Amino acid sequence: MLLHTISTMGKVCPQALESSTTCTFTCKQETFTLWMKSLVLNGKGCTVFDSNGQIAYRVDNYNCKHRAQVHLMDQNGDILFTMLKKQYKLSRFWEGYRFPATRNDHKGPCFRVSKTYKISRGGSIYEVELGLDKNQPYIHKIESSTCNSACKISNEVGVVVAELRRKKSHSGVDLGDDVFTMVVEQNIDISLVMGLVVAYNLINCKM
């Protein structure tokens, strides 16, 4: 099964077995491939490749789906964000911490993602609260257009800063319902976008 996973990974991104260095902010619009599979045998999570087909980010849940704590890592396995599942009354949401965190962390989360009850063009809207760890909160929005993981992330003035859509081959054929193209605009914190995408998928039980 592991050999099958490695073989499939090579088809999604032919250079996927090479390492890469992760840049925090985009200098220009950048494109990534998001594969909703973990590289760990029987694991749950996702793997992100840069435009050169090299591993940039990954999430490995080690055969434990719907867990309450998830780590977003870089290609070396260093933790960039720790996501914690929280609940307040009837509201459930995910919070992201810049470094490994515990539920008693007093610094506070970097972001919080929660699903709203608003409906937009047949999809759903998710509220993103950012800057919570610096006591300077501001709002972003995640808007899904279908029942799959495709979505757009917009800033406080409605400008799209990142978009996730189904990946297609050069001939226009879908590569599967678990392979996505992620486009991130210029001057955007890529690791933060990845944290939001992971939280969004966790809310929808996609990993």
Image (spheres, rainbow, N blue to C red):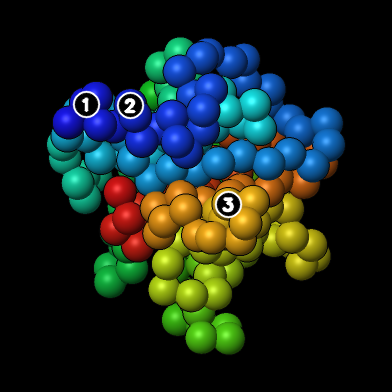
Secondary structure category for the residue under label 1 = helix
Q: CA distance from mark 3 to mark 1?
A: 24 Å
Q: Which residue is mark 1?
A: 2
Q: Residue at x 68, y 41 (%)?
A: 31
Q: CA distance from mark 3 to mark 2?
A: 19 Å
Vertical side of 116 occupied by 14: above or below: above
Q: Which residue is mark 2?
A: 6
The amino acid at mark 1 is: Leu
Q: Residue at x 47, y 53 (%)?
A: 175
Vertical side of 121 occupied by 127: above or below: above
Q: CA distance from mark 1 to mark 2?
A: 6 Å
Q: Which residue is mark 3?
A: 169
Q: Nearer the viewer, mark 3 or mark 1?
A: 3
Q: Provide residue 89's location: percent of width, then percent of height.
A: 28, 68
Q: Provide residue 40's location: percent of width, then percent of height.
A: 25, 26
Vertical side of 166 occupied by 36: above or below: above
Q: Nearer the viewer, mark 3 or mark 2?
A: 3
Q: Residue at x 61, y 48 (%)?
A: 182
Q: Provide residue 185's location: percent of width, then percent of height.
A: 77, 46
Secondary structure category for the residue under label 2 = helix
Camera-side residue: 97 or 35? 35
Local crowd at mark 1 within 10 Å, few (<14), some, or many (≥20)? Answer: few
Secondary structure category for the residue under label 3 = loop
Local crowd at mark 3 within 10 Å, few (<14), some, or many (≥20)? Answer: few
* Quarter of the image where one finds residue 140: bottom right
* Quarter of the image where one finds residue 72: top left
Residues at discs 1 and 2 in contact (Cβ within 8 Å)? yes
Q: Is residue 105 left or right of residue 51?
A: left
Residues at discs 3 and 1 in contact (Cβ within 8 Å)? no
Query: Residue 196: in sight, yes or no?
Result: yes
